Amino acid sequence: MVEGGAARQVAWGQLALATLLAGIAAAYLIEARGVSRSPDNLLLLQPTAIIVLVLYVLVAIGCFRRAPVRAADAEAVETEVAAETWPETLRSATMVAAFGLFIVTLDLVGYDIGIWAFTTLGLYVCGERNRLALLVFPPAFTMLMVWGFRALVPYPFPTTIL
């Protein structure tokens, strides 16, 4: 696509993934509203689905990028992307595996230990090296999340410490 002399590139992979996730969120919301419109049933689902759909619009807009005009710029961008590909891919794969482990082990270790461990690992993998931040933020975030879950969800869920 050419607009005002500048070519545009589309990040098709990211756009396809975001579209899939937004479609799932929209379908789930439509299905849930079709079954029941009770505020108790839609308390978490509807706001989350609306946020997902709004964020989808922003992500979709970001998938349409201006392409470099000069060949030297294009080569510099390709070199920069290639240099970041493997570490970024490894970081992403680590976070996906950690999230999968988090979900699978929630019932075994409890929500409090699971949230704390995932938050700590996520901060570390994403580059946080400040020991004070790694010691203070995960427990505070865990306590806030467990308190929020207990306030919003009417049934008990497993915790180990809290």
Image (cartoon, grey):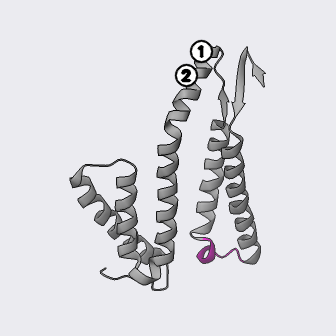
Which amino acid lies under the numbered mark 2 shown in the image of this protein?
Ala
In the image, taking residue 131 as reference, residue 119 lies left or right, namely: right
Residue plotted at (39% across, 53% down):
125
- Helix, strand or loop at label 1? It is helix
Q: Look at mark 2 in the image and give the residue it sits on.
A: 76
Picture quadrant of residue 13: top right
Q: Look at mark 1 in the image and give the residue it sits on.
A: 72
Residue plotted at (47% across, 51% down):
91
Question: Is label 2 in contact with label 1 (beta carbons under 8 Å)?
Answer: yes
Q: Quadrant of the C terminus?
A: bottom left
Q: Quadrant of the N terminus?
A: top right
* Extent of the magenta region: 36-42
Picture quadrant of residue 140: bottom left
Which amino acid lies under the numbered mark 1 shown in the image of this protein?
Ala
Picture quadrant of residue 2: top right
- Helix, strand or loop at label 2? It is helix
